[in-house]
């Protein structure tokens, strides 16, 4: 029996809501039916980013943005329905990631906060909505992230041995695919520092194809300083976010060096940081093939740097299109699958990725 699900993703880059319509059947067959990306307005994007970076936030601002965000989520779902001439009752459920504004799974009071009014999504779409996927994993002693490795293990189970899925979003995370038990964890900054630095210096949201960073020269002392961060020495399971890797973090390293660096040289060094971290992580996990996905896979210069570093140690690089799923829709598809898991009474976490005590059924259900 085939069932339709919608997956919604708003990632660390805070640039858009990604929505997918997928089909999953009882034989574990997966089909991507339709996709839709709705960009946030510049003003709304800045409000989202501020929530993740500000030390103090007005409660009214959280409530307002959560409502407006969910309206955009619901509108994206309804557009998918209209475009595919589907009635709401034809969709089994919506899986919504929400938008992360704080992530502290290792604090004395572990938590991870994703905003979103999921009742509003259910009300405006007429579709059962499932959200809050991280909390149960954290309650079971896990990080609550990354959650996509469980989906990677399920969907890409036919990938060659010694393969890894490397998702380069705002944060990079790796899934090491193994025949027995796969594992995954966050590697560190993906696009978040590259994009934030570029926006601060040009006003543009991102460096198209890495053309500005390409003009710069790496700063070895800055690269070494950033690589000394304790997160990179921490063993997995581990997860992180913009609350740790942000422009304030970068500025501390720049100030400590007290050098006169051009902004393009800093941009070039940030690309090198992401490239080196991703390839060194893949080498440490004895990966022979890497399949890229996420927004960073479109940064031509970043991919070039990773490819050159990988070639030196005999690792091949491709992308998830070679495994049957477009690089832009892997994460949103994961949350459609997580909704399917929840409704089916099946676990959605991968304990070897999150560190949870065991497999858990994830998510809170908002029925219609």
Image (tube, rainbow, N blue to C red):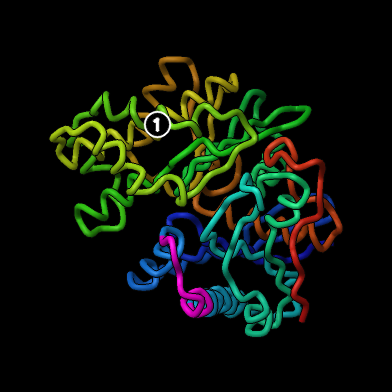
Picture layout, residue 274 above or below residue 140: above
Question: How many numbered marks does the figure carry?
Answer: 1
* In the displayed structure image, the side of residue 211 where residue 225 appears, left or right: right
- Place residue 98 in its image quadrant: bottom right
Residue 167 or residue 223, whichever sits in front: 223
- Place residue 76 in its image quadrant: bottom right
Q: Residue furthest top?
A: 313
Picture layout, residue 60 above or below residue 93: below
Residue 47 or residue 20, whichever sits in front: 47
* In the displayed structure image, the side of residue 209 where residue 70 appears, left or right: right
Q: Sort mark 1 into few (<14), some (14-19) or many (20+) by Cα contacts within 10 Å.
A: many
Picture layout, residue 356 above or below residue 121: above
- Place residue 86 in its image quadrant: bottom right
Residue 247 placed where, x, y %? 33, 48
Is residue 303 in the magenta section? no
Quadrant location, the C terminus: bottom right
Is residue 56 in the magenta section? yes
Which range is magenta?
54-64
Residue positioned 71% across, 28% down in the render: 178
* In the displayed structure image, the side of residue 268 where residue 288 appears, left or right: right
Residue positioned 36% across, 23% down in the render: 308
Residue positioned 16% across, 35% down in the render: 261
Residue positioned 51% across, 66% down in the render: 36
Q: Which residue is mark 1?
A: 275
Residue 367 placed where, x, y %? 78, 77
């Amino acid at each position: 029996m085939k069932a339709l699900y919608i997956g919604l993703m708003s990632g660390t880059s805070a640039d858009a809501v990604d929505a997918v319509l997928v089909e999953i059947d009882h034989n574990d067959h997966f089909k991507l039916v339709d996709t839709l990306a709705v960009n946030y307005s510049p003003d709304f994007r800045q409000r989202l980013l501020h929530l993740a970076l500000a030390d103090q936030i007005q409660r009214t601002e959280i409530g307002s943005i959560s409502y407006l965000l969910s309206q955009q989520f619901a509108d994206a779902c309804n557009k998918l329905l209209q475009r595919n001439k589907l009635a709401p009752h034809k969709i089994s459920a919506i899986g919504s990631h929400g938008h992360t504004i704080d992530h502290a799974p290792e604090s004395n009071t572990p938590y991870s906060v994703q905003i979103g009014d999921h009742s509003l999504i259910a009300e405006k779409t007429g579709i059962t909505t499932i959200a809050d996927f991280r909390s149960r994993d954290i309650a079971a002693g896990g990080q609550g992230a990354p959650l996509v490795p469980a989906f990677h293990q399920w969907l890409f189970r036919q990938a060659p041995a010694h393969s890894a899925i490397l998702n380069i979003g705002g944060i990079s995370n790796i899934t090491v695919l193994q025949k027995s038990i796969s594992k995954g964890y966050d590697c560190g900054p993906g696009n978040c520092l590259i994009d934030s630095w570029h926006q601060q210096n040009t006003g543009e949201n991102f460096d198209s194809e890495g053309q500005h960073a390409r003009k710069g020269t790496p700063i070895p002392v800055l690269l070494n300083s950033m690589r000394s961060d304790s997160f990179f020495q921490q063993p997995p399971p581990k997860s992180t976010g913009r609350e740790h890797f942000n422009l304030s973090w970068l500025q501390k390293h720049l100030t400590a060096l007290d050098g006169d660096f051009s902004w393009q040289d800093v941009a070039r060094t940030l690309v090198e940081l992401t490239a080196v971290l991703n390839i060194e992580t893949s080498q440490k996990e004895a990966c022979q093939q890497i399949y890229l996905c996420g927004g960073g896979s479109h940064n031509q210069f970043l991919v070039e740097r990773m490819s050159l570093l990988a070639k030196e140690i005999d690792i091949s690089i491709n992308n998830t299109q070679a495994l049957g799923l477009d690089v832009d829709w892997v994460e949103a598809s994961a949350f459609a699958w997580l909704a399917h898991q929840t409704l089916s009474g099946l676990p959605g976490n991968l304990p070897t990725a999150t560190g949870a005590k065991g497999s858990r059924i994830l998510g809170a259900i908002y029925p219609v």
